Image (tube, grey):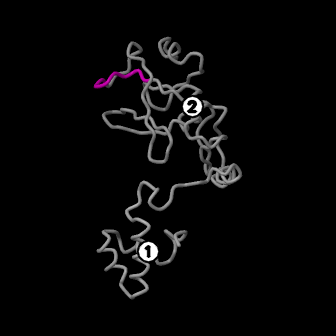
Amino acid sequence: MIPQEVLALAAPAQVQPTQYPGYFITDDGRVISLKRSGSTRPSAEFAHILKTSVGAAGYPVALFSIAGSRVSESVHRLVLEAFVGPCPDGLVCCHNDDNPLNNCLPNLRWDTQKSNVADCKRRGNLNRARGEQAGSSKLTENQVRSIRISLAQGSTCREIAEKYNVTPEAIRSIKRGKSWGWLK
């Protein structure tokens, strides 16, 4: 049974419990908690909308406190699991409009990764950050150009890796064109 306090916070949206005790999800992607900071027991009197944050991949995530541990879960996944059911094997959660911030149930579906990428390409939304624009990049475009010159002059991957504080595998990946292959 869903407490009245949760229904009031969720209105006019539909609401379902999540797999995490004391937490609920609405069909428009709001997460409702019955837990107060520092408390382990859920109580309807503490019902509030949980703040979410945008994770590294650009999708909103909710942080849950479960048995003293922190667990993070994508909001889009919570919505589909609560209202549609568990993710079938081999499928992923897809946004029909390719907007990772739109977690309304009608915008979500389980589908294959291949179909998801095809949708993104068809809509022209497959512009992933690359090179220096990627948040995890340790090298700049100029450094990669210098690395290529060093490789052409016979320097070893290990020597170059030490110079740029990256792994030898990162240098080998540049050498093979697996990473930074787009850079001229």
Q: Quadrant of residue 150?
A: bottom left
Start-end of magenta stretch: 33-39
| Contact? badges 1 and 2 (CB < 8 Å) | no
Give coordinates of residue 163: x percent, y percent: 29, 74
Label 1: few (<14), some (14–19) or many (≥20) C-alpha neighbours in 10 Å: some
Which residue is more in the foreground, 155 or 77?
155
Q: Nearer the viewer, mark 1 or mark 2?
A: 1
Q: Secondary structure at mark 1?
A: helix
Identify the mark at residue 82; answer none if there is no mark: 2
Of residues 75 and 159, the one nearer the viewer is 159
Residue closest to the far right: 122
Whole-percent x and y of residue 37? 31, 24
Give the amino acid type for the residue marked by disc 2 in the picture: Ala
Q: Position of residue 60 (x, y in %)?
A: 49, 38
According to the picture, the residue beneath numbered tag 1 turns out to be 145
Q: Residue at x 51, y 41 (%)?
A: 59
Give the alpha-carbon distance from disc 1 to disc 2, as whole Å: 49 Å
Please tell me whether residue 15 belongs to the stretch shown in magenta.
no
In the drawing, does residue 173 fall left or right of residue 125? left
User: Residue 47, position in %: x, y?
Assistant: 42, 17
Three-letter amino acid code of the residue under disc 1: Arg
Compared with 86, 116 (above or below) is: below
Residue at image point 67% right, 51% down: 124
